[in-house]
Amino acid sequence: MQRFVLAGLSHETNTFSPQPTTLGRFGRSEDESGLLHGPEAIARMAGTRTPVGGFLDILDGHDAELVVPLVASAVPSGRVTDESYETMAGRITDAVAAGADAVFLSLHGAMVTDSHDDAEGELLRRIRAIDPDIPIAVALDFHLGMSPELCGNATVVTGFRTYPHIDTYETAQRAGGTLLRALAGEVEPVISWGVLPLMTNMLNQTPLRQPMKDIMDRAIAAEASGEVLTASVFGGFPLSDIPHTGLSVIVVSDGDKSAGDALRDELLDLAWERRADFIHDFEPMTASIGRATSVPVGPVVLHDHGDNCGAGGVTDVMAVLAECLEQGLDDIVAGPYCDPEAAAILTDAGVGATVTLEVGGKVDMPARGLTGQPMSMTGTVTAVSDGRYKVTGPMMTGMAMNLGPTAALDIGPALVIVCTRPIEPFDVDFYDALGIDPTEHRILLIKSRQHFRAVFEPIAQEIIGVAGPGVCSEDYSLVEFEHIRRPMYPMDLDTPKTVIGN
């Protein structure tokens, strides 16, 4: 009987965020006892459209002992503390040290700790130090920070092909299925990888549209035809100020590295030719909101991408809502805003209570020179919730979510949702938990960059991006990078094409 170690450890680190990522963000407490593992992890992840769910299904029916030492994921925020990382990485390496025939890992690829710019690469290096020959399959997020340690220590690597990420399950199946074929002696995985000095903008990365669509389509076709075993293109995560930032490609070929190298080079060449198309022209916040006033029918989705917790935002910047009210917009549903103090006041007051309080603005963002600005408001509490719901949309389907105590406050022109724990609205189920029908309102103001589109596009009459202030701003004229590779396009327009890879 074979022994498989399956683990999940995911965090997208925004190095400009003022909020350190501690163990409590990954689990139910600030100590090791709160981390999900073992039979409970299997029970909670089984049947979900997640990478761990994908690995579980690939392994289902195999005559094997399955060990799950950790399944941990935290909302994007600042650097992961060393203590937290060592605790979680230790869970995984201890399981491997106890003996294993293969390892299946659901990682992010953009985790940064106090001591490690590439936490995933460091984890793989430690596993290899325990067993130099153990096969390792890795499923990664589309927003990868590529390093030699990651690809140099894995057997098979695959990445999400979608943004919004609706293929996380399939990504793990691609990695896990290929590794099982390798274990059976059917294939011999060989990795080719490369990263460009190209800082793409996340608003222009999605494979749903050009310039990325043709590039990703070529990778998908090469894999489907059997030209290579797997092919993945990664848009990169430009909010990590680390040397590994950039657009990258990973190809896994069957024993013939030249085939993988050729496809890798083709994909990187195509991306470099289109480098100018990956840059976004930013419109002033006031102008974006002004456009919403002329849309005759709702819902109009205003997505504030400057303070999106899905990319490390604090989710309590109130500037966009304030501007909406200043311009006379009404019938707004705004939020959720993460403010534990305000959420407690509202939930304690209860439905029907009239409350005056300050919402948001509790967190300063010194890396961007921003000071928290609370918004004073008076209104009636219309709903309270424990913040628990299950995802029904196409991204992470079946996952149990927890916003903590949550309330809706009607302040007249806006219904303001305030929660205890941050969440990016990649589905509409959080509205249901408060009895809100989003299709009945004119303006839906949310904090998101792309993930909302999977469920909001079908109900929206128009979608307008708003470049609100926050640590997720990708207006590179406002960002001071100290550690990225230089020269880097577009900060350095004369950057030569110099690929780092194998």
Image: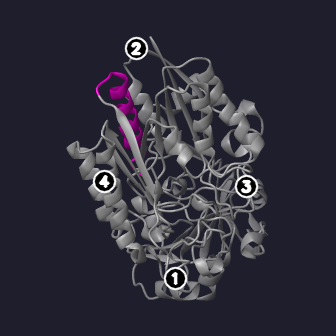
Identify the residue position indicated by label 2 in the image. Answer: 63
At horizontal 54% and vertical 27% (from top left) the residue drawn is 132
Where is residue 455 drawn, in percent x and y? 41, 59
Identify the residue position indicated by label 1 in the image. Answer: 282
Identify the residue position indicated by label 4 in the image. Answer: 263
Identify the residue position indicated by label 3 in the image. Answer: 347
The vertical placement of 397 against 310, above or below, is: above
At horizontal 58% and vertical 70% (from top left) the residue drawn is 486
Observer-nearest of 35 and 234: 234
**Residue type pointed to by label 3:** Thr
Viewer-side label of 2, 3: 2
Q: Is residue 252 magenta?
A: no
Mark-to-mark CA distance, 4 and 1: 33 Å
Q: Specify which label sits upstream in the sequence, 1 or 3.
A: 1
Viewer-side label of 4, 1: 4
Observer-nearest of 118 and 281: 118
- Report the side of 205 relative to 361 (left or right): left
* Residue 155 sits in quarter: top left
Farthest residue in the top direction?
1
Mark 1 neighbour density, 10 Å: few (under 14) some (14–19) many (20 or more): few
Where is residue 124 drawn, in percent x and y? 57, 37
- Report the side of 421 relative to 215 (left or right): right
Q: Secondary structure at mark 1?
A: loop
Quarter of the N terminus within the rendering: top left
Where is residue 8 drawn, in percent x and y? 56, 37
Viewer-side label of 4, 2: 4
Farthest residue in the left direction?
225
**Residue type pointed to by label 1:** Phe
**Residue type pointed to by label 4:** Leu
Span of residues in magenta? 165-186
At horizontal 48% and vertical 61% (from top left) the residue drawn is 437
